[in-house]
Image (cartoon, rainbow, N blue to C red):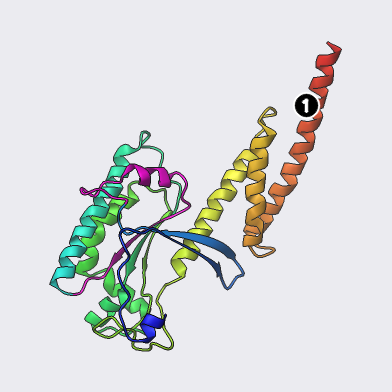
Amino acid sequence: VETIQKGERLPSTDLSERYVYIFSINAEDKFGTDLALLDYAGELLNNKGETNEYFNALLKNMDSIFAIIGIPKGEQEEKEFNDEISKLTTAFKSIDIKRKDKSILLDIPIILLVSKFDRYISQNNLDFSKYDECEKSFYSSDIYKSLEPLVQSIKNITDEGMFKIFLTSAFGECTDNDIPKNREQLDPINLLEPFEWAARKSAALKIKECEKELNSNCLFKSLFTLNSFYKQAEALLPTFPENSEEYNVLTEIDTKFKTQKTKRNKAYCSIFILFISF
């Protein structure tokens, strides 16, 4: 913040470092959650743009993936922009190739974050106060057409509704040197919306998984296994406002788990007594 207020540009992400940012989001409808953001400066891709083994391991544990690419300015940045598109496209294609079962799509939300959208608005002499018009213009532009191979490579591996593009700007309207015009009161574009969308999608997937496991009629399914899903559902409960659809589903899961736990305990006890009697 101090760097911005001094009128200086922020440095690029250090390639030798990995950053973890922990923050909270609270939506207008009282949806809220804590997020841990792992920031990697492209080192999860090899020289060919393919994902490395570390990335593939992370993929199994991440709740969401953000692929970030910035609007270019100038000939050199345009070249780098095209190179980044090529590498990211190759990366998502390599995930597709490595999938053993092609019928199973990735069940985590993936976001293509187009950053520095303020550049596009300024370059095309659009009105910052009319975002819908700016967005419409972008999706019919040549720069979006250059993104289409990347978009398709992501869609090929994600389930329906699990991919979305966000046009963002961390600072809002800037000078030609990428310094915010209003350094005291920044006016970002879609800065938190991508995180809220990903968090909601991820939470919905976890609820669905919990429902599936706790609705199982398998008597001998481990109580330890069921308990782990119950704990997951319990942790999600404060995320949603009371009387919301998700809150009611989680409350129902709580009731079902306690009922199933009682039934299983009685069944195990009966089996044990029967075994002793035999």
The residue that disc 1 covers is 268
Q: Residue at x 50, y 65 (%)?
A: 196
Indicate whether 234 appears above or below 100. Answer: below
Residue 34, horizontal then vertical, whole percent:
56, 62
Q: Quadrant of residue 242?
A: bottom right
Residue 138, horizontal then vertical, whole percent:
27, 71
Is 243 colored magenta in this rendering? no
Q: Residue at x 48, y 52 (%)?
A: 63
Is 53 colored magenta in this rendering? yes
Q: Residue furthest right?
A: 277
| Relative depth, front residue between 271 and 29 | 271
Q: Quadrant of residue 102?
A: top left
Q: Quadrant of the C terminus?
A: top right
Residue 77, horizontal then vertical, whole percent:
18, 69
Numbered disc 1: secondary structure: helix
- Left or right, 205 with respect to 178, comes to right
